[in-house]
Image (spheres, helix red, strand yellow):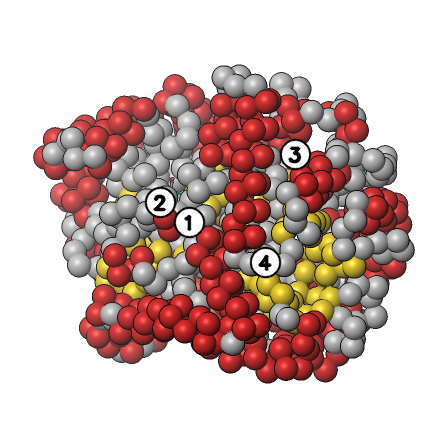
């Protein structure tokens, strides 16, 4: 009998019940009992679904109030000392303090869970870290599951991944030194689970997909030896990448099975079959846990059947990873998804159904699921053949892309001269990243328009009023390069996706991003085509209000991909280039409308990097090419900007330089310009605007602070190539703080100008030449 199981299910609830319950608790509107009740109901529901799908074991411990890595830390007693809390007496309210901060303590840091958009809380470790007993939540979840009559399979982030993601405030601290103590703590947890009668534990070690230093791989094996001393059987769960490069090593570890991601890394299977110890279970992750397309069940069966013959009972079947990364259920979808597109999709609950079909087909023969297989075949064929997926014109155009389309006409130095002449900017020009505060009034207007309560004309009028207001404020502040403020955009990807062919939007396709925050990624199902200009009217109107240059604002191809569910029937590169062509047309139209500076945001450029370094170059090559295809259509005098934030880019600087944007604005204020050292060392050739105001914090830096940051920047980047700006868009801030911060920023820029460019410092005070004379 092949067994089916899941690595984890979404915990937010099909209608984001957990989000609303937790937020109500935070606001003090409901008590812990109500929250506990919601949590229990959600876990019960997930267990019932697993049972209904015929899974042999029911996963426990995939639920978390805020984050599963936080819960792992609490289980191991690893509470950051600075909070002064005791893990053994931790209440729910206490645990939220760690996640959200207190008046005196900042929250624990967050980091992306590998290459997903889910964020974990980073375990804090240091010389004083003591592991030991912690919260009882995992044991309680197991007991709860068993009480309902199920065989509980607890899931636990493994010691390697836990320690790898942990950070110390002291950069000199070597966290690997904690391995022995950590292994002992895991041993205690596993022993208790065994005492509870648990037969299998799923130990998640996605860190194995990374390029780990050998010392870490050694430590992983040693930790397991200690942890597994008196433990239930262990299924080592790997996902997001191949791990067969370590097959020989892992086969020596004291576990009884391995889970493989055969969606992301199908080719690792052969190596594993050659190395799999004869008593091990192999859990085949064949249903895509990272994407929302229906599974080609027949194709997967043809992969699984030989495996079943070879492994018999030792074959387990599962989604590739936890279903945390896909929306919960299609059942709550309304009119937003086109009916045919809906038929091509499987969210978490539908994936459970797919898993059930695979299990039955393997165990009882395909005849018993003939109808289900036929239905899946029909859906796969419908998607393949659907007219809305294919656009011959787009394909022809893409085939015709040549090198000349991905190069500017002249090198940066020449372009800079022409841009200086055309734009007449002072040295150290000041600008912002694009969005201005999204006031409740703006949101209300957008929502009313969306509901159909505010007609197109009135909506346009209201948006224009917002633009006029933003322009007036920027002129009064004395900013040099203006933006229209992005009031019309709810989200920088959604706004464009809604105007492009090939994108669909769900009503309820929420995925947890961090804590109670969820995102609803667009679905890119078909060839991307721009039927008409998307931002030109807005930009033209904004520019008509001012003599100063107005930036056109676009979202780049990689960011559009990264924050969407992307079609899996062609390489991502292909989809990126299609989006790039659509943006290219927009860029061209903006230029023709008299916009002289165009910013193409790529905040997700770095997060698109594959987990395995060996794959980096290929990704970077097409990501850079997509940006250039989008941007290299303008005259030399037109200035291209890009913006990246939250990124550590020192290791990809050559690629960032290869994008050849005339100006890049980046996040640096929090890292106190540390990031800039990399740009200096690498001798970044074009212009840079290192953020001098951290928009993520309500704190207002003083002009002196900003000046000090600018001074540091000017020591690394020649001041002729330096811009002055905040480190990201201002949409989450309020107007009073925004205006005050920008006032100080302009003041700091002027002070430095006077010092470094005394002869040109007055330039900003004289109005630039009339726009008409410059166009
Ligand atoms: N232009 C966008 C804004 O200002 C950029 C947002 C981002 O970098 N994430 O909001
Ligand atoms: Zn940003």
Q: Is residue 23 visible?
A: yes
Residue beneath disc 3: 108
Residue nearer the viewer, 118 or 743: 118
The quarter of the image that holds ligand 1 is top left
Q: Quadrant of residue 63?
A: top right
Give the mark nearest the N terminus, 3 or 4: 4
Between the residue at mark 2 and the residue at mark 1, the CA separation in whole angstroms equals 7 Å
- Tell me: residue 140, above or below residue 341: above
Give the mark nearest the N terminus, 4 or 1: 4
Residue beneath disc 2: 332
Residue at (59% x, 67% y) in the render: 317
Is label 3 or label 1 in front? 1
Q: Quadrant of residue 426?
A: top left
Is label 3 or label 2 in front? 2
Between the residue at mark 3 and the residue at mark 4, the CA separation in whole angstroms equals 36 Å
Q: Residue furthest left?
A: 457
User: Cβ(mark 1) to ligand 1 < 8 Å?
Assistant: no
Between the residue at mark 4 and the residue at mark 1, the CA separation in whole angstroms equals 18 Å
Q: Quadrant of residue 321?
A: bottom right
Is label 4 or label 1 in front? 4
Contact, mark 3 vs mark 1 (Cβ under 8 Å) = no
Q: Which mark is residue 55?
A: 4
């Amino acid at each position: 009998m092949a067994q089916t199981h899941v690595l984890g299910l979404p915990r937010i609830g099909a209608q984001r019940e957990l989000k609303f319950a937790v937020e109500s608790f935070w606001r003090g509107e409901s008590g812990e009992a109500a929250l506990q009740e919601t949590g229990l109901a959600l876990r019960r529901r997930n267990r019932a679904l697993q049972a209904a799908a015929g899974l042999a074991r029911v996963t426990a411990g995939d639920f978390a109030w805020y984050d599963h890595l936080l819960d792992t830390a609490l289980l191991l007693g690893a509470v950051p000392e600075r909070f002064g809390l005791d893990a053994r007496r931790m209440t729910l309210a206490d645990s939220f303090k760690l996640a959200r901060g207190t008046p005196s303590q900042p929250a624990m840091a967050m980091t992306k869970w590998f290459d997903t958009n889910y964020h974990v809380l980073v375990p804090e470790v240091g010389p004083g870290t003591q592991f030991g007993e912690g919260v009882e939540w995992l044991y309680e979840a197991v007991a709860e599951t068993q009480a309902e009559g199920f065989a509980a399979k607890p899931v636990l982030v493994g010691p390697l991944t836990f320690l790898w993601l942990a950070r110390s405030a002291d950069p000199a601290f070597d966290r690997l030194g904690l391995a022995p103590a950590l292994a002992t703590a895991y041993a205690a947890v596993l022993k208790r689970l065994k005492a509870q009668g648990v037969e299998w534990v799923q130990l998640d070690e996605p860190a194995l997909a990374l390029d780990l230093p050998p010392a870490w791989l050694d430590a992983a094996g040693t930790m397991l030896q200690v942890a597994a001393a008196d433990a239930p059987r262990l299924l080592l769960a790997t996902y997001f990448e191949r791990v067969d490069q370590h097959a020989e090593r892992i086969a020596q570890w004291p576990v009884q099975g391995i889970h493989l991601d055969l969606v992301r890394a199908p080719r690792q299977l052969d190596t594993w079959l050659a190395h799999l110890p004869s008593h091990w279970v192999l859990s085949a992750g064949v249903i895509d846990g990272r994407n929302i397309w229906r599974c080609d069940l027949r194709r997967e069966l043809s992969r699984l059947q030989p495996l079943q013959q070879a492994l018999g009972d030792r074959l387990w079947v599962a989604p590739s990873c936890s279903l945390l990364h896909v929306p919960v259920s299609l059942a709550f979808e309304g009119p937003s998804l086109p009916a045919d597109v809906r038929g091509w999709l499987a969210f978490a609950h539908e994936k459970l159904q797919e898993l059930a079909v695979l299990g039955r087909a393997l165990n009882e023969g395909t005849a018993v699921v003939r109808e289900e297989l036929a239905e899946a075949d029909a859906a796969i064929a419908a998607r393949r053949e659907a007219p809305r997926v294919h656009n011959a014109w787009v394909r022809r155009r893409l085939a015709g892309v040549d090198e000349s389309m991905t190069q500017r006409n002249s090198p940066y130095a020449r372009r800079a001269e022409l841009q200086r002449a055309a734009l007449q900017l002072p040295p150290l020009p000041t600008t912002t990243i694009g969005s201005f505060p999204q006031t409740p009034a703006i949101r209300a207007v957008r929502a009313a328009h969306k509901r159909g309560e505010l007609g197109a004309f009135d909506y346009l009028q209201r948006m224009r009023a917002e633009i006029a207001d933003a322009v007036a404020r920027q002129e009064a502040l004395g900013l040099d390069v203006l933006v229209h403020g992005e009031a019309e955009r709810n989200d920088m990807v959604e706004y464009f996706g809604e105007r492009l062919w090939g994108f669909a939007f769900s009503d309820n396709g929420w995925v947890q991003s961090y804590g109670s925050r969820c995102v609803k990624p667009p679905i890119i199902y078909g060839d991307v085509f721009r039927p008409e200009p998307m931002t030109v009217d807005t930009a033209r109107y904004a520019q008509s209000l001012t003599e100063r240059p107005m930036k056109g604002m676009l979202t780049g191809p990689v960011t559009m991909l990264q924050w969407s569910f992307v079609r899996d029937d062609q390489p991502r590169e292909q989809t990126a280039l299609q989006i790039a062509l659509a943006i290219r047309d927009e860029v061209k139209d903006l230029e023709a409308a008299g916009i002289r500076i165009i910013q193409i945001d790529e905040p997700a450029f770095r997060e698109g990097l594959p987990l395995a370094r060996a794959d980096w170059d290929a990704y970077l090559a097409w990501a850079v090419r997509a940006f250039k295809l989008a941007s290299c259509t303008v005259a030399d005098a037109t200035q291209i900007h890009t913006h990246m934030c939250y990124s550590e880019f020192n290791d990809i600087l050559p690629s960032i330089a290869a994008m050849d944007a005339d100006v890049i604005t980046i996040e640096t204020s929090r890292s106190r310009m540390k990031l800039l050292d990399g740009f200096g060392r690498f001798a970044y050739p074009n212009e840079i605007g290192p953020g001098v105001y951290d928009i993520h914090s309500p704190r207002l830096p003083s002009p002196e602070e900003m000046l000090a940051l600018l001074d540091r920047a000017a020591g690394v980047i020649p001041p002729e190539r330096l811009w002055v700006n905040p480190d990201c868009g201002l949409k989450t801030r309020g107007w009073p703080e925004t205006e005050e911060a920008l006032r100080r920023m302009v003041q700091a820029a002027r002070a430095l100008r006077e010092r470094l460019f005394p002869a040109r410092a007055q330039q900003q005070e004289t109005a630039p030449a009339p726009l008409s004379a410059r166009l």
